[in-house]
Amino acid sequence: MSIGIILIGVFAVFMLAGVPIAIALSFSAIVTVLFSDSFTATAIIHRMIGSANSYTLLAIPFFILAAKLMNTGSITRRIFRAAAAWVGAIPGGLGHANVVASIIFSGMSGSAVADAGGLGQVEMQAMEEEGFDPEFSAAVTVASATVGPIIPPSVPMVVYGMMAEVSVGALFMGGFIPGLLLGFTTMVLIFFMSKKRNYPKHTFSIKEVFVSTKEALLSLLTPIIIIGGIWGGIFSPTEAAVVAVGYSFILSVLVYKELGLKAVWNELKSAAIDSATILFIITGAASFSWLVAMMGITNSIANWMITLTSNKYLILLFLNIVFLVLGMFMEALSVLTITVPFLIPLMSAYNIDPIHLGVVVVLNLMIGLATPPVGTSLFICARQAKIPIEKMYKAILPFLVPLLIVLFAITYFPQLVLWLPNMMM
């Protein structure tokens, strides 16, 4: 246990010092090995290499690249224009289009930050030009971006699936209904807030619906191909990520001709950097979590929690609070790679379905991205909307209500998550 104290203590010191999470995880494991006779540096290196040697993880760089190609290749703009034509006549107009476009885009990218940083810029600019307040536009964008990693595909779910050794395809299916609920409840709030504030709406035009849908038709096929292919058993989630890249490349370069080869090369480099960062985190977390498990810390914590209560619903409430707070201060993939080993004995002890818990955990972390004071999506959208972060904090608060309602619903009504996976697998 003294070695365990060194591991946790060194990690805590690194985090308090502001050291990047990947370095903190890796170096805390290395320092611990130096003080231990039970573990060797070779074992740590093997764990790091072994964690990177994963077929499942191949999906991550491809989904990242697909999102970048879509954002720069006009695919997202076409989707937003079509969404605006479909729902723009509802009070709140482009606010609803923001949510619908994010739901569609989430079926291609799997990333909340990609949504907020790419499609979000298009959405906020259009909303402000229509007469929406900048802070309201930014808050809607942050809330709608939360849907990204819940509706399949999902980069965080890929990481959870690898760490918990559960089916990524089942996780993807489990997130579909909660993602639609998030979109619907957010649109209900937008409707009432827009009526109260007299925000503009579009005049419904059949011609605009036809023209914009025709213009975006090939783009709209992307999530159908990806999700349909996974659910139909045509390809695995990893293969779906490759298909997403190939299809996005064909549309952006050959069909729409919005991207040249130089732009594609720049996006390849950017995706490689982002992917390397994520892989560094995962390999560092693999060595850290392996040491934690080998020292018996995970089982000790699980046994301690079991002595506190045998009530599964209280444990779920506790886990919601923990992951919501962690999501506010830490990057989602870092949290998953560190904490999933602790969850495995708890799932067994309390008979919690790992697919159900995976979707609940990911939603908590995504809400954390939208929660003050440190939510990443808040800072991205505040910067793009050119508003003080304090205004962003105030504007996002009403939108946390529907997100938390859906979180409560899927936590205590697990069939909202499990119905589709059970039916289709």
Image: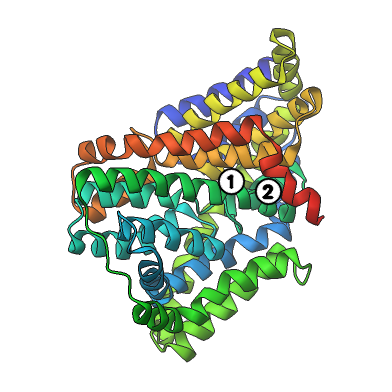
The disc labelled 1 sits on which kind of residue? Pro
* Residue at left offset 47%, top offset 39%: 403
Marker count (numbered): 2
Which corner quadrant holds the C terminus? bottom right
Asked if the residue at tag 1 contacts the one at tag 2, i.e. Cβ–Cβ closer than 8 Å, the answer is: yes
As measured in the structure, the alpha-carbon distance from the residue carrying label 2 to the one carrying label 1 is: 8 Å
Q: Which residue is mark 2?
A: 174
Where residue 408 appears, as percent x and y from the top left, is 56, 31
Question: Would residue 29 be visible to someone looking at this image?
Answer: no
Q: Relative to 323, does residue 156 appear above or below in the rendering?
A: below
SS of the residue under disc 1 = helix
Q: Nearer the viewer, residue 212 or 54?
A: 212
Q: Nearer the viewer, residue 41 or 137?
A: 137
Mark linked to residue 178: 1
Where residue 93 appears, as percent x and y from the top left, is 31, 59
The disc labelled 2 sits on which kind of residue? Gly
* Residue at left offset 50%, top offset 34%: 405
Question: Would residue 320 be visible to someone looking at this image?
Answer: yes
- Return the residue found at the far top: 308
Where residue 20 appears, as percent x and y from the top left, is 45, 41
